[in-house]
Amino acid sequence: MDDLLSRYFSEFIQILQRLDQGKIELMVELLRRTRDRYGRLFILGVGGSAANASHAVNDFRKIVSV
């Protein structure tokens, strides 16, 4: 079990290190501008992804109401 957990964390760290922080900041800024302009964000999920889309919608609604 310890080996599995160590492998999981190692892979997780590798994935995080590959993320482009500049692109994430740009995405956050685009979302902020959309909110400030009372724009709309459409999220689509088909099949199993529909649940992910539904959760994302609820998360973004919480953010907007803050």
Image (cartoon, grey):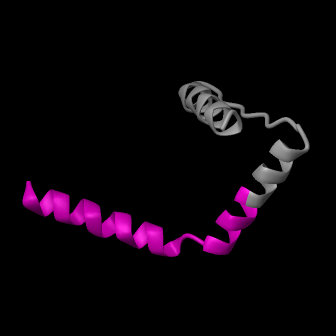
Residue depicted at x 61% and y 73%: 20
Q: Residue furthest left?
A: 1
Rendered view: 17 above or below 4: below
Front residue of 63 and 46: 63
Quadrant in the picture for residue 12: bottom left
Residue depicted at x 59% and y 35%: 59
Residue 10 in the image: state x and y as whole percent: 28, 69
Residue 53 in the image: state x and y as whole percent: 62, 31
Magenta region: which residues? 1-28
Rendered view: 12 above or below 34: below
Q: Is residue 23 left or right of residue 49?
A: right
Residue 9 in the image: state x and y as whole percent: 27, 64
Residue 23 in the image: state x and y as whole percent: 69, 68
Is residue 2 part of the magenta span, yes or no? yes
Residue depicted at x 69% and y 33%: 65
What is the chief secondary structure element of the magenta stretch?
helix
